[in-house]
Amino acid sequence: MHDLAAGVKIFQQDVFPAKAPLFAGLAGRHRPTTLFISCSDARVVPELITHSEPGELFVIRTAGNLVPAHAPGGDGVAASIEYAVEVLGVSGIVVCGHSGCGAMTALAEGHELTALPMIADWLRHADASRPDEGADDGADEVAAWVRRNVLAQLANLATHPSVARALRRRTVSLHGWVYDIATGTVEELDPATGRPEPVAP
Ligand SMILES: [Zn+2]
């Protein structure tokens, strides 16, 4: 395993003292303005990509950045969404997909998942990301899945009552992003057309 204790030591010796006033303020205050939903993939680091400080992003990470649609009973993802919107009052929610996503690769390439029943069950939340019958995804099928999936998860997100209420009140905005690991590019998808535009032109 990567030496986590050595990392903690560096944090305590170098990083924490340099930001001591920030951490002192954060000890009694939690007021992030953005809910950032990304894949659990180790290569996607929301704070790094957005150059955010501790306290600025409320983060949910799931395999494939999937957001189950609202359903009775709730779960960890639904509870975290409700907390971010109703209690923390975030004004923006980003669903961020990424290049080379393992979950989207499994779907695009039709991987055999019989021996991975939890993953197979979880990936059904990406059913709406399937291409239309006869559609051509072009050369990069995985990239096409990644983009469709971000839009599908934004739609799932909007089924959560807290998000639906905030959208009606216009107190929250939803954004679909795709991060490219090889180049550092971040694009925002037009929710209507799926067309990508650079987040920071
Ligand atoms: Zn991924």
Image: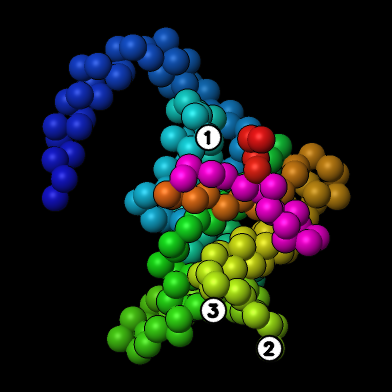
Residue beneath the point at 59% across and 68% down: 144
Q: How far is mark 3 from mark 1, CA to CA?
A: 29 Å
Question: Of the residues under marks 1 and 2, which one precedes in the sequence?
Answer: 1
The residue where tag 2 is placed is: 134
Q: Quadrant of residue 152?
A: bottom right
List the residue tagged with mark 3: 124
> Where residue 148 sits in the image (x, y, percent)?
64, 67
**Residue 70 percent across, percent down from the top left:** 66, 67
State which region is magenta: 183-197
Residue that mark 1 sits on: 50
Residue 90, placed above or below residue 129? above
**Which amino acid type is shown beneath numbered disc 3?**
Arg
Q: Nearer the viewer, mark 3 or mark 2?
A: 2
Q: Nearer the viewer, residue 113 or 68?
A: 113
- Vertical comparison of 53 with 196: above or below: above
What's the residue at 61%, 63% (across, down)? Answer: 147
- Residue 161, located in which quarter of the rendered image? bottom right
